[in-house]
Image (cartoon, rainbow, N blue to C red):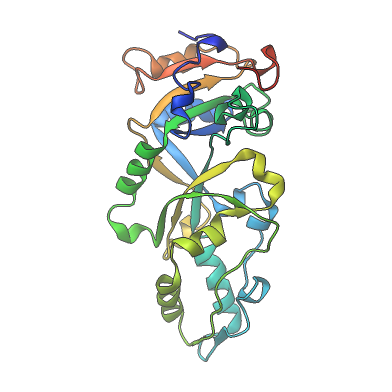
Amino acid sequence: MVLDRQELLSIDDESSRGRYGYRYIGKDGLLATLQTGKLRLAPFETMNDPREARAWQARSLAEGGAGLRAEPPLTEASLQGELDRVLRRGARLASFSRDRPNGPNGPAVALRGWANSSSWDRYADKYRGACMVFDWDLLGEELDDFVTPPELGMISGRLNVEYADTPLTIPTIDKSFSSLEGFRDHLDDIINSRLAVELYGRKNTCWSDECESRLLIVRVNVPPLEIDNPLYMGLGSSLKAIIVGAAFGDTTKLLEHVGAGGKFAGVSVYRTDLNSRPFGGQ
């Protein structure tokens, strides 16, 4: 059963603020996710910030290039290409909106992560798609299970995007390398949670309305045939609700997955029409 907008109580209640991650998605993507029971973590270059798609070279990233050198038999081109292959092309991410802080006039519907009008327009096919609502802590546990054994990921975890009009940065690498294996080992040594935010969790301030958080996996040794392929993480009990847009249309296929006997039976389904109430209304 699809409920009306005014029944969005369990995720609109102020006590639930910060509990959920909201993933905006088109109708086909939603149905594919429910059919497979898997969440897509996309290659970094498919993210929506153009800075994240271009090839990374140490000398083009602030602080990163002055001391990085290749020694024979390793070539400079191979060394720079390996930095991009590991740090950018080895990354897989899934993006979510979060609840924004209350404004000066107190809580407002428009500040909840599921009520971001620009995200409905940009990522949910102009209200023809949906917003998937995940328990953020449970989703983190499912990510931990997915990257076990730990050698699957050099980096894995959840991060909150920071918004600043600053260039992408990597730490200064004042070393010379004669082999790619030695370079990979060095990258493994210097990567930490702060650097993960610098590389994968910083966007220009023009994106700040999304209040984005990300799931992140970076693998060092991605097989060549998989280097630009997404990863698919199995979902368990973290999916709590699905909010379909006002223009979603027929929900028959959706309800096959969340109804009795479906893979996600018990997940709540709502329909929203953000234009039915004044902006910021309660």
Q: Is residue 141 left or right of residue 252?
A: left
Q: Residue at x 49, y 60 (%)?
A: 196
Task: Give residue 240's quadrant in the image.
Answer: top left
Which is more toward the observer, 95 or 276?
276
Quadrant occupied by the C terminus: top right
Q: How many marks?
A: 0
Q: Report if residue 84 is visible in the image.
A: yes
Direction left: furthest residue: 149
**Vertical order, 35 against 197 (above or below):** above
Q: Residue furthest bottom?
A: 72
Q: Quadrant of the N terminus?
A: top left
At a point 67% along the width and 57% down the height, the residue shown is: 51
Q: Is residue 278 above or below residue 117?
A: above
Q: Is residue 234 visible?
A: no
Residue 156 image point, x, y percent: 40, 55
- On the image, the x and y values in percent for residue 84 come to 56, 67
Tell me if 115 is positioned left or right of 260 in this view.
Answer: right
Across and down, in percent, residue 74 comes to 52, 85
- Measuring 38% from the left and 58% from the top, which residue is drawn there? 153
> x, y (%) of residue 115?
60, 26
Q: Nearer the viewer, residue 97 or 111?
A: 111
Frontmost residue, 113 versus 148: 113
Q: Is residue 126 above or below residue 161?
A: above
Q: Which residue appears at 65% of the width and 46% of the height?
A: 48
